[in-house]
Image (tube, grey):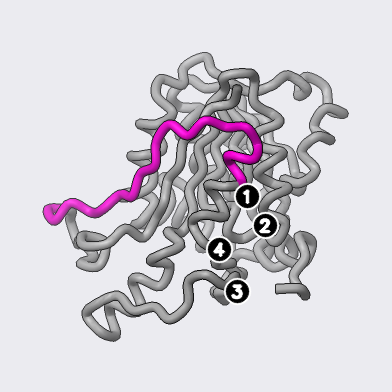
Amino acid sequence: MSEWTNERAIERWGTMPRKLLEDMAHDGDYAKRHLVNPVLLRLLGDVAGRRILDAGCGGGYLSRMLAARGAEVVGVEPGRSLFEFAAEREATAPQGIRYVRADLCDLPDLCDLPDLCDRFDAVVSSMVLPVIPDWTGAMRACVEHLRPGGLFVFTVNHPCFEQLAPTWRAHGEYRTRRYLAEYEIPGPSGANFHRPLSAYLNQLAALGCRLTEVAEPGLPPETPDAVEAYIHLPNFLIVAATTA
């Protein structure tokens, strides 16, 4: 992974096709809709009147969902096509969302912008940390932008079951050969990086956060067009923690 930098990852993800962004504009893709979003919204609770940072907001679908529930949302996204799509949606259908184009590891620079220096009630970072080479810097910045007692919620591909769907299709079961090493997982829009579950949780502890819940959502069998693998094994890990 030594050849990967945040700048290279941002450049790669920032070319995501518009058609894909449009398909995910309302509530994300199938997995987000059925597995990730319900847990995220439950963990965040009543967001009305709360100040929330959507750290790595992509095309902004989660920012828009939170704003529709009454939150005051700031979305940060470095990727060009994703940021432009989110900003365009806000311009055509305003919800009061403030979008900032920035690398998450440079979040302290938000204090150079008017009205953005206050800390947030909650920071959510959904499916972002696995695509960032300097993920520890990004997590630190998220935590530093929380008020005391603020809530940090992040989601990642479950480190134990990242290749769940393709291996299930191929073998009717889940198979893996490596877990403890860190390695790149190539994808159509950019690279993900495998890291052991302990890496995320230990970094959270090192930042002084108190773990409040770990969720491994599974798909209810009655879900329309249910993906069988998602019924039996968790493809996502969702973590909630609070600051001191």
Comparing marks 2 and 4, which lies closer to the viewer? Answer: 4
Query: What residue is rendered at 69% in x and 21% in y?
Result: 119
Comparing marks 1 and 3, which lies closer to the viewer? Answer: 3
Q: Are marks 1 and 2 in contact (CB under 8 Å)?
A: yes
Comparing marks 2 and 3, which lies closer to the viewer? Answer: 3
Choose top left, top right, bottom left or bottom right for residue 90. top right
Between 22 and 53, which is closer to the camera in this rendering? 53
Mark linked to residue 184: 3
Residue type, mark 1 in image: Phe
Within-10-Å neighbours for mark 4: few <14, some 14–19, many 20+: some
Q: Secondary structure at mark 1?
A: helix
Up-down: is 213 above or below 126? above
Q: Are marks 4 and 3 in contact (CB under 8 Å)?
A: no
Q: Residue 198: say if magenta.
A: no
Q: Quadrant of the C terminus?
A: top right
Within-10-Å neighbours for mark 1: few <14, some 14–19, many 20+: some
Up-down: is 43 above or below 219? above
Q: Which residue is mark 2?
A: 81
Q: Position of residue 174 (x, y in %)?
A: 30, 75
Looking at the image, is mark 1 or mark 3 earlier in the sequence? 1
Q: Quadrant of the N terminus?
A: bottom right
Q: Which residue is mark 1?
A: 85
What residue range appears in magenta?
A: 203-222
